[in-house]
Amino acid sequence: MSALSAAILAVIQGLTEFLPVSSSGHLVLGETLLGSQAFENSIAFELVVHLGTFLAVLVVFWKDIVELLSVFFSLIFIPRKWSSEFSTNPEFKLSVLMIIAMLPAGFIGLLLRDQISDLFSKPFMVSIALLATGSMLLSTKFYTRSDNPIDLKRAILIGFAQALALVPGISRSGSTITMALALGVKQEQAARFSFIMVLPLIVAATLLEFKDLLEVGISTDETIILLIGLVISFIVGYLSLKWLLQLLRKGKFHYFAWYCFTIAIFGLFYF
């Protein structure tokens, strides 16, 4: 992989990790168009660009993350307080609901890891999945705005929406935020819940990829390529996340549907 290809793929990852257009689907299509599958350490490259966007979430939501973690770990070792704190402490309740929402994707991801991995080599199927993503996003145009809290039922449904996004081409942020909006959750709360709850899953997936990376190893020459991917994915990821939050507040989430339809149609004809 050349430095230019690494930069292009890092930009794609940084933009599409948070914008509701499927980062995994774009990486599949991008690598196919650029002929980058032959890169010996594609595992390493995917690891560092995901790490870059992970760091972007930490920077944007650091206050929320610190507050949630401090409250959660101050109470997690005191079981007798769980019930009362879940009812009265909104931060503790939210942290517990995020853990619950992660379970469907974590379980399905481990159970169907090989089958899901096979889809990453099928750009035609990714294009079909992008059509589904576009349809989900377009539906948000017709949702009535409300301010329902995220409770246990809503958290579980959002969790299953996240599990659906294991398929490349189905946007994780698109599916989870769309589900939250459909359930009447306020835009800012939907985005906060969606992006923070995925962090442990990113860490788990990164550790699994790192294990594979240790078996493959990396050369000195490839280090520069990986650094390019890390830095660019972080910068672009940070900017795209801030932009998405602004669009959500303005009720323009459905605009991305037309982009997904365009890329999907291109993929269907090209591949």
Image (spheres, rainbow, N blue to C red):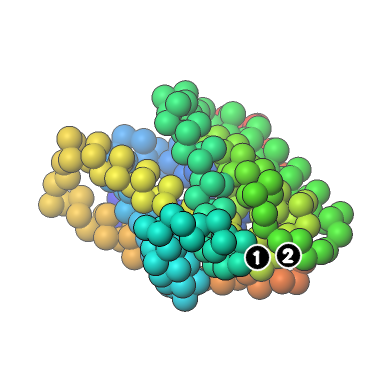
Mark 2 secondary-structure assignment: loop
- At 66% across and 73% down in the image, what residue appears? 246
Left/right of residue 158 with respect to residue 58 in the rendered view: right
In terms of depth relative to the viewer, which is nearer, 35 or 122? 122
* Observer able to see residue 136: yes
Query: What's the residue type where badge 2 is placed?
Result: Lys
Residue 186, which numbered label? 2
Find residue 162 and report its horizontal and vertical position in percent: 58, 44
Query: In the figure, is residue 155 to the left or right of 48?
Result: right
Q: Residues within 10 Å of mark 2 (few under 14, many from 20)?
A: many
Residue 169 x %, y %: 58, 39
Contact, mark 1 vs mark 2 (Cβ under 8 Å) = yes
Callout 1 crowding tier (Cα within 10 Å): few <14, some 14–19, many ≥20: some
- Please give the residue where the numbered disc 1 appears in the rendered image: 189
Note whether residue 53 is visible.
no
Percent position of residue 4, x then y: 36, 56
Q: Residue furthest bottom?
A: 63
> Residue visible at 50% across and 31% down?
108
- Work out whether residue 227 or residue 245 is closer to the camera in this orientation and state it: 245
Residue 40 bears which disc, if any? none
Location of residue 125 (image quadrant): top right
Figure check: 36 above or below 176: above
Quadrant of the snapshot with the C terminus: top right
Residue extending furthest toward the front: 80
Q: Tell me which amino acid carries mark 1.
A: Gln
How many numbered marks does the figure carry? 2
Q: Marks 1 and 2, Cα distance to the nearest angstrom? A: 5 Å
Residue at image location 66% in from the left, 68% down from the top: 188
Q: Quadrant of residue 247?
A: bottom right
- Residue at image position (71%, 61%) is 149
Q: Element type at marker 1? A: helix
